[in-house]
């Protein structure tokens, strides 16, 4: 078990981690887009703690400013000092494995105020997501699972079934979600740095609308669950 989470610093710094031991559930997309949204109001940093470095690379290659600063950092000793970076909001993209990234994840959890666990509700993602939720819950950090990359053609029953599966296990979840639109990947490929706020192509507005609902729910959680 990791050490108890740190309290928000006097200057209001909040650390929000995105974690799931299952790769491909959208941790990087969630991290970057929520960070870009937060940067409209707060000085924001994205810390890419995944060896693949996708969040950092995409952010640095963006033709349009993403609104936040970004670093690629894998050293747990450095991650222990996240709150000293001087940012009001710090979003951390965690490694996509508990087996090899546990030391990094546990150090991030020791600093985190809140954890988002992206989940696509595919069969291969279910048990890894449940294990990640169990690990985060043991750390004592407030968290929620976020339904992500949900096929927009699936009806409400599919989403309700996903929430029911999480509720049955006592796993808290967002009641907003992100649907799967080409805009998410197109924003990466067409110079937007992976941020739909920078992209105006097909379905971008729908993606931004989804993002706004999730960002609003996250902001409410941070106000209610995390004393600032």
Image (cartoon, rainbow, N blue to C red):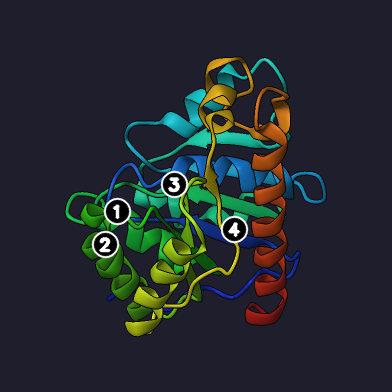
Q: Earlier in the sequence, mark 1 or mark 4?
A: 4
Cα gap from disc 1 to disc 2, whole angstroms: 7 Å
Which residue lies under the disc numbered 1? 122
* Mark 2 and mark 4: Cα distance apart in space: 32 Å
Residue at x 27%, y 76% (from the top left corner): 1
Residue 222 placement (x, y as % from top left): 67, 71
Residue 63 placement, left or right of 171: right
Marks 1 and 4, how far apart at CA: 35 Å
Check the image and name the residue furthest to the left: 99
Image depth: mark 3 or mark 4 in front: 3
Q: Earlier in the sequence, mark 1 or mark 3?
A: 3
Q: Identify the residue position indicated by label 3 in the image.
A: 27
Q: Residue 193 at what x, y percent from top left?
A: 59, 24
Determine whether label 1 and label 2 are within 8 Å by CB.
yes
> Residue 23 location in percent, x, y?
29, 44
For disc 3, the neighbor class at 10 Å (few under 14, some 14 to 19, many from 20) is many
Which marked residue is nearer to the observer: mark 2 or mark 4?
Answer: 2
């Amino acid at each position: 078990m990791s050490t108890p989470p740190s309290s928000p610093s006097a200057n209001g710094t909040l650390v929000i981690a995105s974690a799931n031991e299952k790769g491909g559930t959208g941790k990087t997309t969630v991290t970057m887009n929520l960070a870009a949204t937060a940067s409209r109001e707060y000085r924001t940093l994205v810390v890419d703690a995944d060896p693949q470095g996708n969040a950092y690379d995409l952010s640095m290659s963006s033709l349009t400013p993403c609104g936040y600063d970004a670093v690629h950092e894998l050293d747990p000793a450095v991650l222990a000092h996240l709150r000293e970076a001087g940012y009001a909001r710090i979003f951390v993209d965690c490694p996509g494995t508990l087996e090899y990234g546990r030391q990094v994840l546990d150090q991030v959890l020791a600093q985190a105020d809140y954890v988002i666990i992206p989940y696509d509700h595919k069969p291969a993602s279910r048990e890894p997501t449940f294990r990640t939720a169990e690990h985060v819950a043991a750390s004592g950090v407030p968290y929620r699972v976020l339904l992500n990359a949900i096929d927009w053609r699936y009806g409400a029953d599919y989403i309700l079934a996903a929430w029911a599966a999480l509720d049955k296990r006592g796993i808290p979840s967002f009641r907003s979600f992100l649907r799967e639109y080409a805009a998410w990947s197109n924003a990466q490929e067409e110079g937007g740095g992976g941020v739909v706020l920078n992209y105006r192509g097909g379905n971008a507005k729908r993606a931004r609308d989804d993002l706004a609902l999730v960002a609003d729910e996250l902001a409410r959680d941070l106000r209610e669950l995390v004393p600032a």
